[in-house]
Amino acid sequence: MQPETSVIRERVNEIFGSNFTVRKAFSSDKYEIVHGGKTCLDFEFMDEDPTDDKQMPFIKLENRTKPRILKVSGVFKCQGDERNGASLMRLIDRLAESIPFVEYITLMDASNIMICDISISLAQLKILTTGQSWYNHFGYKTKSHDANVAHNEVIINTSVDDVMRKRLMCKNLIETTGKKLFPELSTTMTVREYVQAVLDSVRQFPENCTPDQREKASFLNTLIFQVGWMNDLQYINWDLIKRVERGPMTMASSASSAQGHGGTKRSAKRKRSRSAKRKRSRINKRKRSRINKRINKRSITRSATKTP
C-alpha cells in the first residue's frame, strides 16, 4: 500500500467513521459515505487534472505525483443535523485540510430541493434570491464567477414588471397562474423579492401536499426557469473548484500524520542522522571517560611517589 493511500484511508475513517458507514472501492481511492443504507457522499482522490484548461486556467497544481485533487461526485442530504448538506460540506473541508498533499476540491453542482415531490434547482433558486449558488457560498467557484455574479445581480434586481415586458412567456405565467396563486404579490417587486416571497410561502409544505400546495410548488419551479435561465441567468455548474486552505495548526497536524505513516525520504533521513549523532556522542563520551580515568590514575601514582 502506498503511504498516500494509507493516509487517505485513516483520515476518511477518522472523520466519517463515528457517524457514518465508510465504503471503499477495492482498487481505487473512491469512497462512499453511507448512513442508514442511504448514500450521503461520493468522492474520490485523483492525481490527474480532470478540468478543462480553458475553463480552469487558474489551477496551479504543485504536486503531480500524488492524489492532490479531492473530487466530490455527489452530496445527498441524510438524516440528522450532523448529516445535512452544510454539515457534509464542512466535513469535506476537514477531510481535505487533514491530508497534506490534497490541493483542490472539485465538484459538479446538481443540487436540488424537493417540495411536494417536485425537484427544484437549488442553484437557480439561490442565485435568484441571494446572487450566488449554494456551493458558491462554500467557496466553490469557476474562473467566470465574478463576472457571472455581476451579470446576475442586474437580473435579480430588475422589477418583475420589466421582465414581463421583455419576456412574453414570463408575462403569461405571472398574469395567469402567479396572480391566481399569490394575489398579494406585486409585480413592482424585484425578481429577487418576488421569488423569495414565493419560496417563503411554499418551503414549509409537508411531504403529502394538497393539490393547491403542489400547484404552488410547481409554479415556483416554472418561475425560476422563466425569470432565470430564460432571462439569461449565467452559471456554470460543472467543475466548480476550491483551493484547500490550511492554517498553521492544520499544516502541523497534517505533516505529523504523514510522518506517522512512513513520512518522506527526507524525514527518514533526518531520523537516521539524529540516531547516528546520538551514537557518536555516546562513543565519544565513553572515550573521554576512559582517558580521564587514565589521567587520574597517573596523577595518583605521581602523588604517591612524591610523598615522604
Image (spheres, helix red, strand yellow):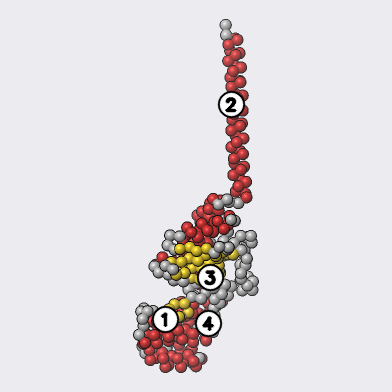
Quadrant into which the C terminus falls? top right
Residue beneath label 2, please? Answer: 289
Work out whether residue 241 can be spotted: yes
Given residues 235 and 45, the one toward you in this image is 45
Disc 4 marks a residue whose amino acid type is Leu
Q: Which secondary structure lies at badge 4?
A: loop
Q: Earlier in the sequence, mark 1 or mark 4?
A: 1
- Res. 200 mark: none
CB-based contact (under 8 Å), mark 2 and mark 3:
no
Which mark's residue is nearer the viewer, 1 or 4?
1
Disc 2 marks a residue whose amino acid type is Ser
Query: Residue 134 location in percent, x, y?
Result: 48, 73
Q: CA distance from mark 4 to mark 2?
A: 83 Å
Residue beneath label 3, please? Answer: 73
Query: Residue 96 location in percent, x, y?
Result: 52, 62
Residue at 42%, 62% in the rendered image? 19
Query: Residue 206 location in percent, x, y?
Result: 36, 79
Disc 3 marks a residue whose amino acid type is Ser
Q: Is residue 15 above or below residue 127?
A: above
Q: CA distance from mark 2 to mark 3?
A: 67 Å
Circle 1 crowding by C-alpha within 10 Å: few under 14, some 14–19, many from 20: some
Circle 4 crowding by C-alpha within 10 Å: few under 14, some 14–19, many from 20: many
Residue at 43%, 86% in the rendered image? 219
Q: Which secondary structure lies at badge 2?
A: helix
Work out whether residue 248 can be spotted: no
Residue beneath label 1, please? Answer: 117
Quadrant into which the N terminus falls? bottom right
Residue beneath label 4, please? Answer: 233
Q: Is residue 109 above or below residue 247?
A: below
CB-based contact (under 8 Å), mark 3 and mark 4:
no
Q: CA distance from mark 1 to mark 2?
A: 86 Å
